[in-house]
Amino acid sequence: MSHLIYQGSTKNIYQIDEQTLEFEFTDDYSIFDYGKMPDQIPGKGVALCSMAEKSFKELKASGIQSHFISRTGLNKIRVQYFHVPEIYRNEKYDYTFYQKKPENTLIPLEVVFRLGLPKGSSQLKTGSQFKTNYPDYPCYENARFEKPILQFYTKLERLDRELLEKEAQSLAGLTDSELKSIKTITIKIIDYLEKKFRPHHFQLWDGKFEFAFGKEIQGHREIILVDSIGPDELRLTKEGEIYSKEKLRQFYADSSWLAELQQMKKIAPLHFKEKLKSKPHLLTSRQIEETSGIYHELKNIFTSSVMVLGKGGREHALAKHLSESPFCDHVYVVPGNPGMESDKISICEISEDLLLEWCQTKGIDFVVIGPENTISSEFNTRLRDHQIPVYAPTQAASILESSKQFSKNFMSRYDIPTASFANFNDKQSAKDFLQQSAWEKIVLKKSGLFAGKGVFICENKEHALQNLELYFSEHDEMVIEECLSGPEVSYFALCLDHEFKILGHACDYKRLKDGDQGPNTGGMGCYSPAFWLTSEQEKEIEHKIIRPTLQGMQAEGLRFQGTLFIGLMMTKEGPKVLEYNVRFGDPETQTLLPRLESNLFELFQAVAYQNKTLFKKHFVHIKDLSSIHIVKAAQGYPGIDGETIEADQPISGDYQNSEFIKLYFAGVKKKDHQLVTAGGRVLGFTSLASSHKDARELAYKNLERVFFKGEQFRGDIGL
């Protein structure tokens, strides 16, 4: 049974057993030795935990031992316990314990390294003292050193004080070889950090490490790295901007509280906090978001693992896209399909309860939910209740898609252009309405989620009455609409409250057969962009539909965070909404993502952590290329009127991707170590080219590279 042994200003420590501690990194922060400040920095604890875990593991691979054992939660790690002796006796600090050469004990020193003198460095304030101690080193603001300076400070005293190297060695009871080991390990860690940060244009200036004595081996005690490594221990800048805890100090630089604190430190250095009359002010929401963004950006350098929920072609495209980010270490897809697997993509079939635990212990940075059914389910809420960041709208906000009745009423309330409609909760009332309707063509829609198969386009009143009788139950919730005319387009935006980034647009083919014949499906193909859409129409869609939608959701108390996918018809009167979706489309995603110049990892992360500052910082860049996606479905799909959908057909051919051809798997499984069909939409090819015509030719040219018995595909995608 664990128990709390230390509640700190940035982390809590629990005793698990005689040999094990658990660190809980919190979102609290401390500056100027004041202790816990009044605000919290969202995501800070998770970021520090992730950086500690990753750095300890990588340093171990290079031969540097640490106290790290395992990760046990989103913000928790298990570490080896080292004894911390009580050295304050008789009103003074007594280090005689360390002369006994103890093992498994914290070394009472902080090892500080300096690679230069950034603005605000304490060494600049000493001026002549620094020049005296280090005559061969430059002493001016932003000076960089040719080799590091290593300094030693007390660790267990109330106020840190700098020690000469010999004094530090004597005080800690270090042998010459142990001192040499500490210095050698410190230089190796600095080299590791420099190699980690430099490619991302960060400058590492200084930092501190802590060590412990391990077991004695042949007269030499092991030197073990302890505590953690992150922006709370390091000072970093990027293009002149501060990326460390120093940023928080700046927010208080001109405050009366800091002036009083500094004065009290001089008057009563051991009791300054008790004598303070003022308290630190609260940070602004922008300052909090800005600081939170720093922790996320630094965490990404140590790379993160993410999880995608789903198993179709859309999820394959999302997983592949995220895996290509330099900040992504690995993508886990649950349940996924075996066609997705690669060096950086793994599939896992685990229960919901195990998944929640797994996300926490494996350090999953955020979860991306693909299917609409999962977004609108209780599991979406459970993830958030377990403090697991999610890229998807909340379960409550998913009503925009999961209830067509709600969405039509919503559009009416906020003057968002859509077709004339009426909502019904029983078949008889719907019949009465249809018999009196003057609409020429009519659309019947089931109100809930039906995987794109709950919509019936009727040529006339009689056809509508037939479909109502065939496909609707007595008390189905439904929407009856006037059928609009014009070209259709799917429009995508990545959203965080009222802020959004356009991801592009696409046109999909819902019917099973060429010429838009046959039953509706989840989608048999797609092209992007909708080349016929003008820039004026794009502006109109954003101004009259996307902005009012996001503003309306906020007014309803339903903050929208995730992908907004709007089905539109471009009528003579302008764009009108056919339907809202609260996720990426399938197959639209397979055409949108390959066209992106930028990776969406950091924007997904900003949405998952609800960080608007980070969200505004990153942009979506789209290549000037056209893409076509063609789906191959199993025989019998979509299974209308009891038709059996075939499965277990071997999938043969060349699975290789290239820069301009992408293969995405959906309805597949493995049988005797070979991919076979699992029914439904089996796979799809995406092509990229400089023109729509060339993209179409390339797609169909490559379509026969992968094949299976009974395959169905359309021959008119992109015409």
Image (cartoon, grey):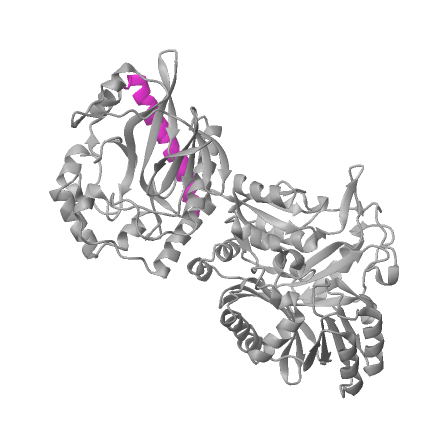
Q: Residue furthest top?
A: 218
Q: Which residue shows up at 62% across the image and 72% down it?
A: 407
Q: Quadrant of residue 256?
A: bottom left
Residue 144 seen anywhere in this rendered image of the structure? no
Chief SS of the magenta region: helix
Examine the rendered structure and indicate whether residue 363 appears above or below residue 189.
below
Examine the rendered structure and indicate whether residue 476 appears above or below residue 263.
below
Q: Give the camera-side residue of 45 and 342.
A: 45
All told, the count of numbered labels is 0
Residue 80 picture location, percent across and down: 43, 27
Residue 604 picture location, percent across and down: 53, 55
Q: Give the camera-side residue of 169 and 693.
A: 169
Q: Does 176 appear in magenta?
A: yes
Residue 677 seen anywhere in this rendered image of the structure? yes
Examine the rendered structure and indicate whether residue 360 appears above or below residue 434.
above
Q: Which residue shows up at 29% across the image and 24% down it?
A: 85
Q: Quadrant of residue 104?
A: top left
Q: Which residue shows up at 38% across the image and 47% down it?
A: 202
Residue 265 picture location, percent across and down: 16, 44
Q: Is residue 172 left or right of residue 577?
A: left
Quadrant holding the C terminus: bottom right
Residue 696 picture location, percent across and down: 73, 63
- Which residue range is magenta in the image? 174-200
Q: Residue furthest left?
A: 267
Q: Is residue 547 left or right of residue 491?
A: left
